[in-house]
């Protein structure tokens, strides 16, 4: 953490919402507000000109959307999204380990998020900056990398290295080297973003990487037992067993 | 039929009481028309008997008595057939019905024959006769044949009557289901407040709580008014109301949007006084204005202008919502906004049966305009307020 104050920019089209962010940021002495812009086009030029380290970005903006802003900027700041609730976007934010605030948000939630971001501003050179993570996570194509938050750090997980994923309540527990990692997405949301040729949901609470499967053998007359390369065993559901049998043939 | 019923809402408000009371008719009542037809047929039968008897030289008193002796048992037989159709047939089909029918035929024809014999011998015993009464095999066969004929005729009539009743019952039920379904559809179509709008308003209010508490208070009041109207329309299943109420709802909505969008939102509105009394579908005006806000104001950094006008043309109400947005607003209506227009169009179909018109398109100035023409009256539940 440098002694210098962190330069922040607000991108928000609603005046009252801007005022709210401004008042929240006024309480964080380590943040220096360098500008406020109200539309997407101005956001792109301001980000590249002012080079802030931190941008608060509304998703729905006049002219061009917050997501399009990320595609157009050359400077790569840490980004915190603000959005009215959108289930799909929230899942995508989680897959990119992106920070976001769901409107309406008050001081307490904002400060919690700010603390997390503060610890992360000295970025690990291994971790891609958040605009790039956002591009990966918010696109429609199968993910090649996931990002998990561990404490203040963000850890990239190459999708090919994932052995299996297990549902843990609202979370998905991703088993990969250095893990397991917890992602705040449902298994269904995660499955929708994984390459169906490589990953199979074999049970209500299990996804396996087919490349990590050592062998399949009958468990009972309807179900298959999956043995993974690391020796872990998972019993596939009846319908998934049927699907696996077809795939093997 | 089943899958249709599953789509029906579980909420009781949308279910008309008469639709819920509908139960399958197992024992239909014999109506007056059927009774009159049956009695006339019977009187005719007796008259024909009496006529035939008198033709063969039998004295008129005896001919009438003989006709009654033949007619009463056969009439009772026909009555029994109808009663059987009502009580027994209604629940039976196929082989069961056929065997019940055969047993009934044998029993009833036998009973009718016995009754005729009894009545005729009674007649001989009471009034005397030149010839002693005796059973003639030819007469037995003839009487049984006539009874069987009457049985067949009345059984066919009873069956036809029963099937007709059932068909009419089915039709009535289908009509009720249709009414029911369009009610359910209507309540689904009554557009809802856009949740994104609500969340954004709440967020704006959060911003005012410390910065401008007075504005926060008035915004919360407006939000309360907005929700109260929306809730009332939903809870009471109101399909139409006076434009006055819709106009007020729109004004409340605009007050909140004004807070959110500031001077980017510029509005001009005008409503003729008698237009305000005209009946309009609930949630018809605000969604049109919201469309304009979403497609012509929110996407532009400089905002824009929305014009809202209501006036009477002939006996119809003309509502116009236009904006000065660019071509984007027309393209924008394909998604969420287009959905709102489609929902409104569907509702207009149900409420006005093709007599209302909704047209939308770009204006000469490059903006976008929606015009809604509403005739007086309409279907659906009118707001009593």
Image: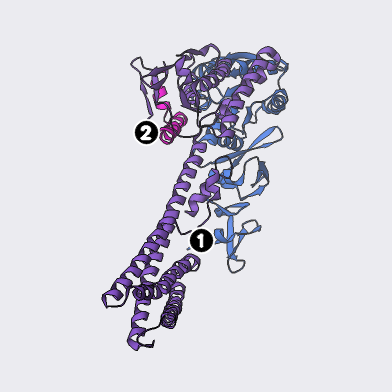
Q: Position of residue B215 (x, y in %)?
A: 65, 13
| Magenta-highlighted residues | B325-353
Residue shown at the point (56%, 32%) measured from the top left: A134
Q: Position of residue A151 (x, y in %)?
A: 72, 35
Left or right of A169 in this view: B198: left
Left or right of B170 in this view: B233: right
Chain-order first, disc 2 or disc 1: 1
The mark tally for this picture is 2
Task: Give the labeled residue for mark 1.
Answer: B26
Determine which quarter of the picture holds residue B251.
Answer: top right
Task: Give the labeled residue for mark 2.
Answer: B354
Q: Position of residue A31 (x, y in %)?
A: 69, 17
Question: Hue of chain A?
Answer: blue
| Picture disc at residue B134 | none
Residue A96 is a magenta residue: no
Q: What crowding class fits label 1: few (fewer than 14 Cα within 10 Å), some (14-19), or many (20 or more)?
A: few
Q: Main secondary structure of the magenta part?
A: helix
Determine which quarter of the picture holds residue A18.
Answer: top right
The image shows residue A241, relative to residue B236, as above or below, that is: below
Question: Hue of chain B?
Answer: purple
Q: What crowding class fits label 2: few (fewer than 14 Cα within 10 Å), some (14-19), or many (20 or more)?
A: few
The image shows residue B331, relative to residue A196, as above or below, that is: above
Q: Is residue B268 visible?
A: yes
């Amino acid at each position: 953490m440098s002694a210098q104050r962190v330069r922040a920019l607000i991108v928000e089209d609603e005046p009252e919402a801007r005022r709210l962010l401004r008042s929240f940021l006024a309480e964080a002495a380590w943040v220096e507000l360098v500008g406020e812009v109200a539309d997407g086009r101005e956001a792109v030029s301001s980000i590249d000109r002012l080079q802030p380290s931190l941008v608060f970005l509304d998703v729905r903006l006049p002219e061009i959307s917050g997501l399009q802003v990320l595609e157009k900027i050359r400077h790569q700041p840490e980004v915190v999204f603000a959005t009215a609730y959108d289930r799909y976007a929230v899942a995508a934010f989680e897959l990119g380990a992106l920070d976001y605030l769901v409107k309406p948000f008050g001081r307490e939630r904002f400060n919690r998020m700010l603390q997390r971001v503060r610890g992360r501003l000295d970025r690990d050179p291994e971790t891609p900056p958040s605009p790039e993570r956002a591009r990966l996570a918010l696109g429609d194509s199968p993910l090649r990398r996931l990002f998990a938050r561990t404490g203040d750090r963000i850890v990239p997980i190459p999708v090919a290295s994932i052995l299996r994923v297990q549902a843990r309540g609202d979370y998905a527990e991703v088993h990969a080297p250095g893990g397991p990692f917890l992602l705040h997405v449902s298994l269904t949301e995660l499955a929708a973003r994984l390459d169906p040729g490589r990953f199979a949901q074999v049970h209500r609470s299990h996804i396996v990487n087919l490349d990590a499967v050592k062998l399949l053998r009958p468990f009972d007359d309807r179900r298959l037992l999956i043995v993974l390369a690391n020796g872990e065993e998972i019993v596939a559901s009846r319908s998934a067993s049927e699907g696996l049998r077809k795939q093997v043939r | 039929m089943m899958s249709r019923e599953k789509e029906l809402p579980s909420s009781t408000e949308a279910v008309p009481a008469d639709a819920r009371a509908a139960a399958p008719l197992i024992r239909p009542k014999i109506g007056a028309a059927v009774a009159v037809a049956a009695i006339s047929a019977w009187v005719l039968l007796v008259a024909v008997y009496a006529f035939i008897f008198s033709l063969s030289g039998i004295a008129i008193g005896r001919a009438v008595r003989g006709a009654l002796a033949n007619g009463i048992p056969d009439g009772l037989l026909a009555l029994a057939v109808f009663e059987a159709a009502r009580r027994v047939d209604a629940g039976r089909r196929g082989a069961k019905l056929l065997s019940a029918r055969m047993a009934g035929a044998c029993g009833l024809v036998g009973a009718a024959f016995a009754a005729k014999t009894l009545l005729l011998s009674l007649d001989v015993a009471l009034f005397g006769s030149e010839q002693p009464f005796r059973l003639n095999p030819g007469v037995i066969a003839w009487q049984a044949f006539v009874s069987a004929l009457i049985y067949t005729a009345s059984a066919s009539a009873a069956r036809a009557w029963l099937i007709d009743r059932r068909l009419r019952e089915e039709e009535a039920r289908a009509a009720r289901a249709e009414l029911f379904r369009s009610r359910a559809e209507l309540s689904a179509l009554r557009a809802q407040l856009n949740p994104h709008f609500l969340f954004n308003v709440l967020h704006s209010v959060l911003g005012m709580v410390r910065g401008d508490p007075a504005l926060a208070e008035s915004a919360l009041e407006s939000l309360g008014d907005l929700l109260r109207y929306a809730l009332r329309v939903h809870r009471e299943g109101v399909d139409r109301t006076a434009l006055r109420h819709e106009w007020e709802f729109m004004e409340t909505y605009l007050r909140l949007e004004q807070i959110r969008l500031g001077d980017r939102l510029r509005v001009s509105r005008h409503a003729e006084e008698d237009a305000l009394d005209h009946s309009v579908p609930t949630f018809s005006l605000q969604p049109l204005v919201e469309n304009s806000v979403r497609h012509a104001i929110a996407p532009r950094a400089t905002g824009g202008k929305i014009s809202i006008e209501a006036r009477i043309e002939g006996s119809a109400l003309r509502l116009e919502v236009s904006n000065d947005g660019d071509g984007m607003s027309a393209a924008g209506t394909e998604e969420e906004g287009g959905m709102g227009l489609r929902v409104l169009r569907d509702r207009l179909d149900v409420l006005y049966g093709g007599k209302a018109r909704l047209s939308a398109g770009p204006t000469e100035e490059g903006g976008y305009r929606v015009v809604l023409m509403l005739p007086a009256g309409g279907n659906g539940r009118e707001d009593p307020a």
